[in-house]
Image (cartoon, rainbow, N blue to C red):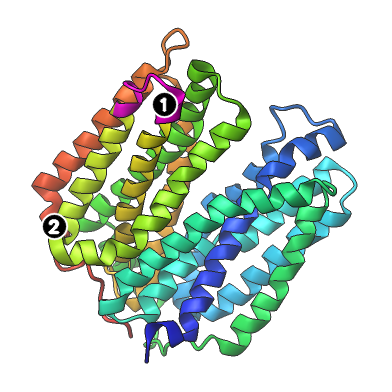
């Protein structure tokens, strides 16, 4: 059967779109909510934090549940909770209620990004798996680029309108319930055996390298690019918020362009060289920032960074599905998701320690050096990924 005739492909994409919408759709609405409820600038970020925090707290637990009881049994209730809690905010009358409902919505969305990776590992053969990972990354990147625009249009009507859109996710849950056919899983061992085997997979050298790579990539993204490069563009070039957002969005378009070709690149040069190339591009991106003298050219290092994301992230997600068999894939993927959230969380404050007298140059230097360090790490130790880079066959 043709890949594009496989209904599971579109279920994965729809799940990914739901995961992206939770943050991207609401970002333009934050200033409107702040004015409506007289929320200080330092607190309005709670609308985002309330959604992402459950991902750190619950995602590993949900990964275990996905292994023990199946993907569908966890995915459908998660999508329903995500839709209903988000939609109910339309009728909220105070900021506290918004924050509580966003936390509940975050519980629903906690497993969704990991679920897409699990399903690709479960449902697609080795020859298609990395290709689908790349396509899924492209879908995610396009959603990340376009949802803020859609949310901004809806927010011009009312602060409530973007939240009304979440009710549109409920038919998605019905679609998944009817059409998603979960692969048969082997009989599960006892919990003690399950945890011992999972820990054995988690502490393998190849697993540690993959987890460290995921943590590093998203620390660089959320700290170096999304936080401090945006501030640098504002302070150094005097760019307004519209142009900053437009330029940063170009990274998503670059990711969406390169990600679908990740499988072809791997077929030519292999996983180890892909990571070397990706981190080398990260280094070029950060070092290039320091040589840009005209604001129009800042888009070049941003797009180089996006291209590196398109090369490395699909490969990273594909490899993590190969670190353990089907029965342990949920906990392995969820551990990576948790570390990615950690990278997103600690990136800005950790890199912020490098600012000297308001000068952000040390941040970009440090990010460039760290990227080169990971490239060198893969030069010497990347061969330990051999044997897991394509993942095991699905059950």
Identify the residue shown where x is 27% and y is 53%. 210
Residue on which disc 2 sits: 384
Residue 204 lies in the magenta-colored region = no
In this view of the protein, which residue sits in the foreground, 111 or 147?
Answer: 147
Q: Which mark is residue 351?
A: 1
| Residue 381 x %, y % | 12, 49
| Residue range corresponding to the magenta coloring | 288-297
Q: Quadrant of residue 238?
A: top right
Q: Which mark is residue 243?
A: none
Q: Earlier in the sequence, mark 2 or mark 1?
A: 1
Up-down relation of residue 390 to residue 371 (above or below): below
Crowdedness near tag 1: few (<14), some (14–19) or many (≥20) residues, C-alpha within 10 Å: many
Identify the residue shown where x is 30% and y is 54%. 311
| Residue 131 x %, y % | 32, 70
| Residue 235 x %, y % | 53, 17
Identify the residue shown where x is 35% and y is 54%. 310
């Amino acid at each position: 059967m043709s890949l594009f005739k496989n209904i599971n492909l579109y279920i994965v994409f729809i799940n990914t779109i739901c995961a992206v919408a939770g943050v991207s759709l609401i970002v333009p609405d934050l200033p409107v909510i702040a004015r409506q409820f007289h929320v200080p600038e330092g607190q309005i970020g709670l609308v985002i934090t309330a959604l992402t925090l459950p991902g750190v707290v619950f995602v590993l637990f949900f990964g275990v549940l996905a292994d023990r009881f199946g993907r569908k049994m966890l995915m459908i209730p998660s999508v329903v909770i995500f839709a209903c809690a988000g939609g109910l905010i339309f009728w909220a009358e105070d900021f506290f209620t918004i924050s509580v409902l966003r936390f509940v919505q975050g519980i629903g969305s906690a497993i969704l990004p990991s679920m897409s990776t699990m399903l690709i590992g479960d449902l697609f053969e080795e020859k298609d798996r990395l290709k689908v990972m790349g396509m899924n990354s492209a879908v995610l990147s396009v959603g990340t680029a376009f949802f803020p625009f859609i949310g901004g249009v809806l927010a011009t009507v009312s602060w409530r309108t973007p939240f009304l859109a979440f009710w549109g996710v409920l038919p998605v849950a019905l679609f998944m319930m009817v059409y998603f056919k979960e692969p048969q899983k082997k009989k599960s061992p006892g919990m003690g055996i399950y945890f011992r085997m999972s820990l054995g997979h988690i502490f393998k050298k190849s697993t540690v390298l993959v987890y460290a790579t995921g943590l590093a990539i998203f620390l660089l993204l959320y700290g170096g690019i999304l936080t401090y490069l945006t501030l640098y563009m504002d302070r150094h070039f005097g760019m307004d918020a519209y142009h900053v957002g437009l330029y940063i969005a170009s990274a998503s378009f670059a990711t969406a362009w390169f990600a679908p070709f990740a499988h072809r690149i791997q077929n030519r040069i292999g996983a180890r060289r892909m990571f070397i190339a990706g981190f080398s591009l990260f280094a070029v991106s950060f070092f290039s920032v320091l040589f840009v003298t005209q604001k129009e050219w800042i888009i070049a290092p941003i797009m180089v960074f996006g291209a590196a994301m398109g090369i490395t992230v699909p490969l990273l997600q594909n490899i993590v599905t190969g670190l353990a068999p089907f029965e342990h894939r949920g906990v392995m993927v969820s551990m990576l998701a948790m570390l990615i959230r950690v990278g997103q969380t600690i990136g800005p404050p950790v890199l912020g320690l490098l600012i000297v007298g308001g000068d952000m140059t040390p941040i970009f230097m440090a990010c460039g050096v760290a990227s080169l360090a990971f490239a060198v790490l893969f030069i010497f130790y990347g061969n330990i990924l051999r044997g897991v880079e394509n993942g095991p066959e699905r059950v």
